[in-house]
Image: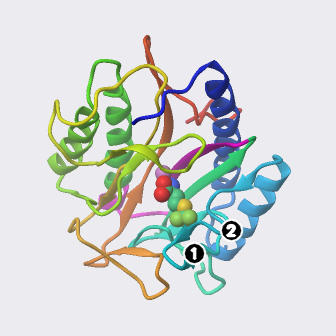
């Protein structure tokens, strides 16, 4: 069953998503050459606390492991779930994906973006541009009466048209009182397939797009997903509310700039 949020749930989701977006927005400004991914993780911890929220990543359990970071910070070939480290110092030409998931008053907001460090190569810039466009195209399909596969297809089609690889192993998801609720939202699939979209769903739509092969592997830390060919990867994510009038992005920062 896909949870449908009532007026109360939607109000709480708005708050949690506003916090997640504000934290992500403030973190973006700190991405520069010389900063370590540990610094960014500590910043996430501080900002989330200042908002009166909690990191939904910290302590997140998968099997017998608990995620040790406060946000996921994934550089270049790291696709998702990178762990902040003093050894990873950002350099000119890098790209860094920031994924912020917060819990606030019992509800969860989830969003991510990928930021360039200094000057990046034209093809890597294209990776960022196309992945960000794919997110918008996916969100546009989150319309009442459509199906989840319409979101999946729109994302896959756009990315593959530009020669990029769509990650299969990780997917978008419903989000609400839990970080991962039904439905799963793959970034690949067929139009008209999957569950029907009704008003009141809150969906985390999150294309993970590789410059080269779509294939990935997991590092020995048990968390960090990297591309199989070590080529760069981008990740963009919004939490979206489905409404009769059309999809509404909930993870909007105070500035309103997405
Ligand atoms: N946005 C990621 C997701 O939707 C966050 C993972 S949290 C972590 O799965 F705990 F695994 F880091
Ligand atoms: Co997510």
Question: CB under 8 Å between callouts 2 and 1?
Answer: yes
Characterize the local packing of mark 2: few (<14), some (14-19) or many (20 or more) Cα atoms within 10 angstroms: many
Check disc 1 and report the residue beneath it.
83
Task: Tell me: 119 left or right of 149.
Answer: right
**Above or below — where is 230 with respect to 4?**
below
**Who comes first in sequence, dot 2 or dot 1?**
2
The C terminus, quarter of image: top right
- What residue is shown at x 63% (from left), y 38% (from top)? 17
Measure the alpha-carbon separation of dots 2 and 1.
8 Å
Name the one closer to the observer, 60 or 19: 60
Check disc 2 and report the residue beneath it.
41
Q: Position of residue 72 (x, y in %)?
A: 56, 65
- What residue is shown at x 66% (from left), y 66% (from top)? 58
Count the labels in the image. Answer: 2
Residue 186 in magenta stretch: no
Q: Residue furthest front?
A: 1
Span shown in magenta: 106-125
Q: Can residue 149 be spotted in the picture?
A: yes
């Amino acid at each position: 069953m896909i949870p449908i949020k009532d007026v109360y749930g939607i109000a709480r989701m708005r708050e949690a998503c506003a916090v997640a977006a504000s934290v992500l927005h403030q973190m973006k400004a700190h991405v520069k050459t010389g900063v370590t991914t540990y610094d960014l993780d500590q910043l996430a911890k501080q900002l989330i606390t200042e908002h009166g929220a909690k990191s939904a990543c910290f302590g997140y359990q998968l099997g017998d492991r608990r995620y040790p970071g406060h946000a996921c910070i994934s550089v270049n070939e790291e696709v998702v779930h990178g762990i902040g480290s003093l050894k990873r110092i950002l350099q000119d030409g890098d790209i860094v994906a920031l994924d912020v998931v917060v819990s606030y008053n019992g509800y969860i907001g989830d969003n991510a973006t990928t930021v360039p460090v200094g000057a990046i190569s034209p093809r890597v810039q294209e990776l960022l541009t196309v992945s960000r466009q794919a997110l918008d195209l996916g969100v546009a399909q989150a319309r009442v009466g459509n199906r989840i596969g319409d979101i999946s297809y729109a994302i896959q089609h756009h990315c593959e048209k530009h020669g990029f690889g769509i990650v299969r192993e990780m997917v978008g998801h419903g989000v609400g009182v839990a970080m991962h609720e039904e439905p799963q939202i793959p970034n690949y699939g067929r139009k008209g397939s999957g569950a029907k979209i009704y008003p009141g769903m809150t969906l985390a739509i999150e294309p993970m797009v590789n410059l080269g092969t779509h294939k990935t592997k997991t590092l020995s830390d048990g968390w960090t997903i990297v591309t199989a060919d070590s080529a760069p990867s981008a990740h963009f994510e919004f939490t979206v509310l489905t409404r009769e009038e059309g999809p509404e992005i909930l993870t909007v920062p105070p500035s309103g700039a997405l």
